[in-house]
Image: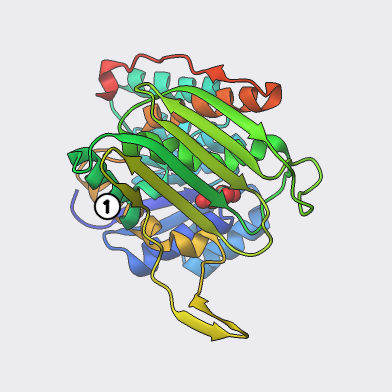
């Protein structure tokens, strides 16, 4: 299509507003023309701030001629309802991660998309758009340094959104590793474990912290992910890839050098919002471009589904403290 892509956003919380801002102020080819939120008073304020139309009913907004395409940035439990409404309306939809909390809900979305006969859905796994992860993928794909054998990763949060329960560490946070490492290596997982070690004194009640997730891919690559929900200080993501002929590391973001007290060093990101700000911009610009050309070229509903199957197995592994086999899923030809 030529001209501006008219976008309607369901869910005007933090990530919804961050996307509205980037679409209207930094990116090209699209404008947010409508929004909806379960909290109508708040949603109307946001609509006023961004100069767009407020719809009390998100499904009515999705069906209306006002919008060409849809963003779903509600809380996770409502993703399925609005993604389904977009498929029904025949509109492209960008849904923040996870596609839906359970594999069953994701399966219903896949079935609806296949029945519609066209891919409409993209899932917001922004790490695939980070320049550092893209450099790692390029080096792995060319096998410049031989086969990847082991990955050592860390995902350290300064603080964590409630609820503070054990499942949120996998389902809200480590899902990023589940998606990006599968994409990086180009293969699916065979088994998963989530182990508890000694807990930090800062652990929130109801959340064992830290947790270690261990994934093994179908070819046998072993991955360990250290996950801190609350380290109290900084946001840090690490990914070290041990190959046959070299060791590669995810580049650290370029930040200012600071001399303070008795330490000289580089500033670190305080939150994921700043650490991945550029990745989000690239992700959504590429989504706008692809949507205007009538295609989905980012992580789709199938990726969202596989991610939740793995997250479900990881949760079972955590609760039983065992190794869980991930049931092999045959990819429908529709998603090739
Ligand atoms: C948050 O929802 C995100 O998506 C961040 O990328 C992740 O690092 C954080 O742990 C999540 O809570």
Establish if 108 lies above or below 120. above
Q: What colour scheme does the image use?
A: rainbow
> In this view of the protein, which residue sits in the foreground, 169 or 303?
169
Please provide percent x and percent y for residue 54. Answer: 53, 55
Task: Determine crowd level at label 1: few under 14, some 14-19, many 20+ residues with C-alpha closer than 10 A.
Answer: some
Residue 303 found in image quarter = top left
> In this view of the protein, which residue sits in the foreground, 183 or 5?
183
Can residue 52 be spotted in the picture?
no
Please provide percent x and percent y for residue 5. Answer: 30, 53
Q: Residue at x 44, y 59 (%)?
A: 276
Establish if 84 lies above or below 251. above
Q: Which residue lies most toward the right here?
A: 205
Q: Which residue is mark 1?
A: 135
Say whether residue 306 is left or right of residue 247. Answer: right
Q: Which residue lies most toward the front here?
A: 245
Q: Residue at x 61, y 31 (%)?
A: 194
Q: Residue at x 57, y 27 (%)?
A: 193
Label 1's element?
helix
Quadrant of the drawing holding the C terminus: top left
Please provide percent x and percent y for residue 149. Answer: 35, 34
Can residue 12 be spotted in the picture?
yes
Please provide percent x and percent y for residue 88. Answer: 41, 28
Establish if 22 lies above or below 325. below
Q: Residue at x 33, y 18 (%)?
A: 331
Residue 33 found in image quarter = bottom left
> In this view of the protein, which residue sits in the foreground, 171 or 232?
232
């Amino acid at each position: 299509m030529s001209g501006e892509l008219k976008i309607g956003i369901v869910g005007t919380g933090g990530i919804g507003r961050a996307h509205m801002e980037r679409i209207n102020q930094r990116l090209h080819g699209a404008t947010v023309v409508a929004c909806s939120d379960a909290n109508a008073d708040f949603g109307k304020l946001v609509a006023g701030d961004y100069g767009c139309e407020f719809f009390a009913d998100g499904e009515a907004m999705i069906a209306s001629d006002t919008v060409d395409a849809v963003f779903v940035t509600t809380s996770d439990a409502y993703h399925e309802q609005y993604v389904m409404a977009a498929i029904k309306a025949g509109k492209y939809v960008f849904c923040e991660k996870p596609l839906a909390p359970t594999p069953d809900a994701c399966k219903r979305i896949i079935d609806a998309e296949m029945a519609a006969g066209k891919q409409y859905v993209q899932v917001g796994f922004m790490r695939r758009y980070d320049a550092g992860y893209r450099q790692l993928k390029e080096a792995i794909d060319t096998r410049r340094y031989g086969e990847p054998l082991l990955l050592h990763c860390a995902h350290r949060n300064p603080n964590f959104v409630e609820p503070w329960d054990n499942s949120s560490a996998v389902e809200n946070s480590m899902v990023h590793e589940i998606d990006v490492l599968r994409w990086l290596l180009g293969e699916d997982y065979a088994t998963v474990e989530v182990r508890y070690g000694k807990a930090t004194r800062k652990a929130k009640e109801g959340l064992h912290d830290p947790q270690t997730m261990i994934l093994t891919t179908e070819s046998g690559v072993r991955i360990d992910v250290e996950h801190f929900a609350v380290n109290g200080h900084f946001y840090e993501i690490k990914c070290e890839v041990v190959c046959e002929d070299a060791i590669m590391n995810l580049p650290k973001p370029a930040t200012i050098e600071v001399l303070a007290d008795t330490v000289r060093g580089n500033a670190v990101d305080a939150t994921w919002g700043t650490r991945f700000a550029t990745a989000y911009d690239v992700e959504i610009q590429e989504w706008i471009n692809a949507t205007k050309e009538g295609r989905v070229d980012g992580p789709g509903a199938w990726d969202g589904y596989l991610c939740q199957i793995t997250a479900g197995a990881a949760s079972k592994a955590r609760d039983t403290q065992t190794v869980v086999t991930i049931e092999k899923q045959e990819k429908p030809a529709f998603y090739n």
